[in-house]
Image: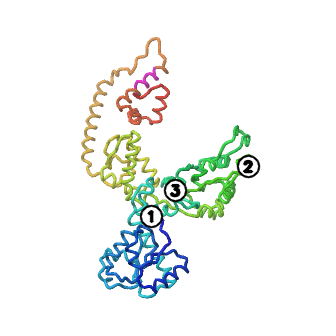
Amino acid sequence: MNSQVVNKVILVDDDEQRRASLGNILSSLKIGHTVITFVELLQSTERFEQYAIALIGKCSLPLSLNKLIHFFSDSYKNTPLCLLESWNDTEKLTEKSRKLLLRVLSRDVDEELLTDLLHEAQIYRSVRVKLKGQVQAEFPLIIGKSSAIVELKQVMCKVVDREVNILISGESGTGKELVARSLHNVSSRAKGPFVPVNCGAIPAELLESELFGHEKGAFTGAVSSRAGRFEMADGGTLFLDEIGDMPLPMQVKMLRVLQERCFERVGGSKTIKVDVRIVTATHRDLEKMVESGAFREDLFYRLNVYPIEVPALRERKSDIQTLVQAFTERASDQGLGRLKFQRSAIDSLERHPWDGNVRELLNLIERLAIMYPDGVVGVSELPMKCRHVDEPDPSRYQVQSDMNLESDRHFISVLEETAQAPPPLFVLPDLGLDLKQQVEDLETALIQQALDKSNQIVARAATLLSIRRTTLVEKMRKYGIQRK
């Protein structure tokens, strides 16, 4: 079924004169419509076509209004109904049927009333689709079922295949690039490339070359011609992240490209045309930047044809448990072990302010997966700043604390007994040794033991050695150590 609602009206009425009159009004307003009798409606094989509204008039058949409403609900999903006149059994409608009935008219339909009905039907459909969550499966990268996420997906649905410029705004870490990728993945451009560019991460003097490419000899170091990101994105989507960090001189050149969809490479004279959809994003307030002169007003309005606001994580805390589950599965797939969370830990995470938004939550899950591989996370395993509820069972940690204290006492006692004659850790031979080689041999042996104890999982081995995973990978490469 096509998810796009057609601006079309179905009129079902056995009153011939009213059918003709309303048909003329619909034609004068240039609204597509189907005008039929009840016999034609029930005999029609057409089903599941989307209508803006169904206008229901007089019925000469022995048909109950409840059955008619359920027929429309099954065959013409999300099409609101409006009775042109009251039926004999209107007062006998079930509660479910009443919710599906938009209005019962007490006067004849004119252009003003019809326009008002179409507006009311538009709002009705929007609410119905939101309640049914019909857009959930269309954007699998956007995780969550909160009202804020449902509303975001509703907004995204309306512009999936619209060739307009989109400006995605939201705080850092909210997932603006995921929104851009999702729009690309379900659009007609999905088979084309998705090319992201972070305008804030590229030096101002290199940004023009990065976007538009350059010809050989255009500047020092340009030893060959190179295509820019616009050319790479031809036939697909170009995502310009942190557009608010783009220098003013570059903004002027961007404006021309957006208007004409053509440009020249740096140092070139050939005009290149591209078929690219432009999606931009920023965490800055561009309107304030326009007022201060830091961002061009004409470029802002050119980019902001269709704005999308990505909600902060604190505005969708009901999604945190779903996000935690998704991120723990991702960590497991990366070999970090599968975490389990106690309900109290989830409660604590739901009370955290999440200034870093979804990215902060993802980083936390990865850190916990390294610290407690295949373990269970309670409140006390969370970082101190994430503990917003009391530990529900502090006694179990007290037992561990007592055990650690006893162990410490025993260790101190042993140290005291041997303090007068501590054995040397290593005896230096009389002829000396190659210290560098000795250290390398020791590191190699310890790394190999850590890998053996961690089932060859690098992340776990790094934890045993109290070093970063990337540091361990570099040392393995340096010493030629391979996982078994």
Query: Does residue 224 sit above or below 44 in this rendering?
Result: above
Dot label at residue 187: 3
Q: Is residue 130 magenta?
A: no
Which region is colored magenta?
438-446
Identify the mark at residue 270; answer none if there is no mark: 2
User: Residue 123, image x and y in percent?
Assistant: 45, 73
Relative depth, front residue between 236 and 68: 68
x and y percent of residue 197 in the render? 58, 49
Q: Secondary structure at mark 2?
A: loop
In the picture, which quadrant includes the N terminus? bottom left
- Tell me the tag on residue 422: none
Relative vertical location of residue 465 with respect to residue 440 in this rendering, above or below: below
Residue type at mark 3 is: Ser
Q: On the image, which quarter does residue 151 sit in?
A: bottom left
Q: Quadrant of residue 370?
A: top left
Q: Nearer the viewer, residue 225 or 291?
A: 225
| 3D distance between C-alphas at marks 2 and 1 | 44 Å
Contact flag, marks 3 and 2 (Cβ < 8 Å): no
Which is nearer the eye, 444 or 162? 162
Q: CA distance from mark 3 to mark 1?
A: 19 Å
Which of 60 and 113 lies nearest the eye of the viewer?
A: 60
Placement of the C terminus among the 4 image quadrants: top left
Q: Residue at x 24, y 47 (%)?
A: 395
Where residue 18 appears, x then y in whole percent?
Answer: 46, 85
Is residue 280 left or right of 351 when viewed as pictured?
A: right
What colour scheme has been applied to the protein in the rendered image? rainbow
Q: Residues within 10 Å of mark 2 (few under 14, many from 20)?
A: few
